[in-house]
Amino acid sequence: METEITLKYPSTRFAKSVMQALTPDNTVKGDGMRITATTRGRTLKVAVKNCERIETLRLTVQDIFRCIRAAESSLGKTK
C-alpha cells in the first residue's frame, strides 16, 4: 500500500522548512516501508510506500500529520 500527502504553502521557503523538519523521519523502516518528502515551489509532497498493513499506514500518516502540524506551528511563530 502507498499514499501521498500534498500540501501547498504561502512560500517556497515555508514548504522547504516544513520538509526539513520532517527529514529525520524520512527513512526506510525495517519492514521495507519508505517515507520521502520533496518540495517543488510552494508544494510539499510526502510519500509513504511499500507499507504492508493498513493499520501501519494509518498510524504512519497520523504521525506525519502531527509532525507537519508541529512544524507549521513553530514556523508560524517565527515569521
Image (tube, rainbow, N blue to C red):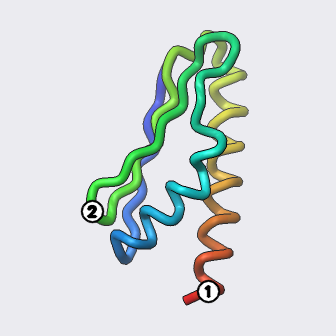
The residue that appears at 67% across and 33% down in the rendered structure is 60
The residue that appears at 34% across and 58% down in the rendered structure is 43
Depth check: 56 or 27 in front?
A: 27
Relative image position of residue 79 (x, y in whole percent): 55, 89
Determine the image quadrant of residue 58: top right
Relative image position of residue 17 (x, y in whole percent): 50, 65
Q: Is residue 1 left or right of residue 75?
A: left
- Residue beneath disc 2: 41
- Residue beneath disc 1: 78
The three-letter code of the residue at mark 2 reads Gly
Q: Is residue 48 left or right of residue 24?
A: left
In terms of secondary structure, where does tag 2 sit?
Answer: loop
Q: Is residue 12 left or right of residue 21?
A: left
Q: Is residue 30 above or below residue 39?
A: above
The residue that appears at 70% across and 22% down in the rendered structure is 56
The three-letter code of the residue at mark 1 reads Thr
Of the two numbered discs 1 and 2 on the same chain, state the one appearing first in sequence. Answer: 2
